[in-house]
Image (cartoon, rainbow, N blue to C red):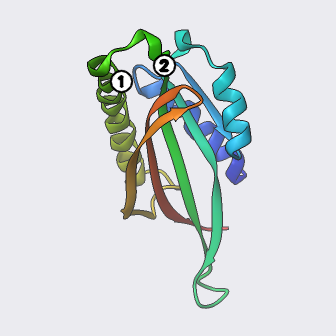
């Protein structure tokens, strides 16, 4: 199976096992993300976004060559700002954080068994807030792992 198909399947698998994720989508760049988020309805919250990974070579010889895969996942909730006061706005981040924790726990569990994630670099994991990305808020998880050809 190719790397793109694996990633699409992985997003589907995450949605299947994590309560609250009602939709997923793989995107390539900011313009595609913006187009999709603009068309996303708040009735379909929460949304799992996977950005098509970047790959770079790693290793000193052809025998130990691997691809370092840099991944980014986002858990987002479409928000109409006029409907939320200060506390309700920050509750969006609290609610999406719970789902981000579930996603991260699943990634860590999959790294113990999944062939593609078995070389997860846990020190590379970063979680950052996403604010007003096409009227969506939540969190992004970034991490990398090595893959064989």
Residue 92 appears in which quarter of the rendering? top left
In-front residue for pair 92/46: 92
In-front residue for pair 14/35: 35
**Quadrant in which the C terminus is drawn:** bottom right
Q: Do the numbered discs 1 and 2 sit on residues whose CB atoms are within 8 Å?
A: yes
At numbered mark 1, what does the secondary structure look like: helix, strand or loop? helix
| Mark 2 neighbour class, 10 Å CA radius: few under 14, some 14 to 19, many 20 or more | some
Question: Which dot marks residue 119?
Answer: none
Q: Which residue is mark 1?
A: 92
Vertical order, 73 against 19 (above or below): below
**69 left or right of 139?**
right
Q: Position of residue 26 (x, y in %)?
A: 66, 38
At numbered mark 2, what does the secondary structure look like: helix, strand or loop? loop
Q: Residue at x 33, y 42 (%)?
A: 105
Q: Position of residue 75 (x, y in %)?
A: 46, 33
In-front residue for pair 62/133: 133
Q: Which residue is mark 2?
A: 79
Vertical order, 101 against 119 (above or below): above
- For marks 1 and 2, give the CA distance: 9 Å
């Amino acid at each position: 199976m190719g790397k793109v198909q694996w990633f699409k399947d992985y997003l589907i698998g995450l949605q299947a096992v994590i309560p609250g994720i009602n939709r997923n989508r793989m995107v390539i760049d900011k313009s595609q993300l913006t187009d999709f988020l603009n068309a996303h309805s708040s009735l379909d919250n929460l949304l799992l976004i996977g950005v098509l990974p970047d790959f770079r070579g790693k290793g000193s010889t052809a025998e130990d060559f691997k691809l370092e895969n840099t991944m980014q996942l986002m858990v987002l909730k479409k928000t109409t700002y006029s409907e939320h006061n200060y506390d309700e706005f920050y509750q969006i981040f609290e609610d999406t954080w719970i789902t981000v924790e579930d996603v991260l726990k699943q990634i860590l569990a999959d790294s113990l068994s999944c062939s593609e994630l078995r070389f997860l670099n846990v020190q590379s994991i970063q979680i950052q807030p996403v604010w007003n990305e096409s009227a969506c808020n939540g969190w992004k998880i970034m991490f990398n792992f090595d893959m064989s050809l």
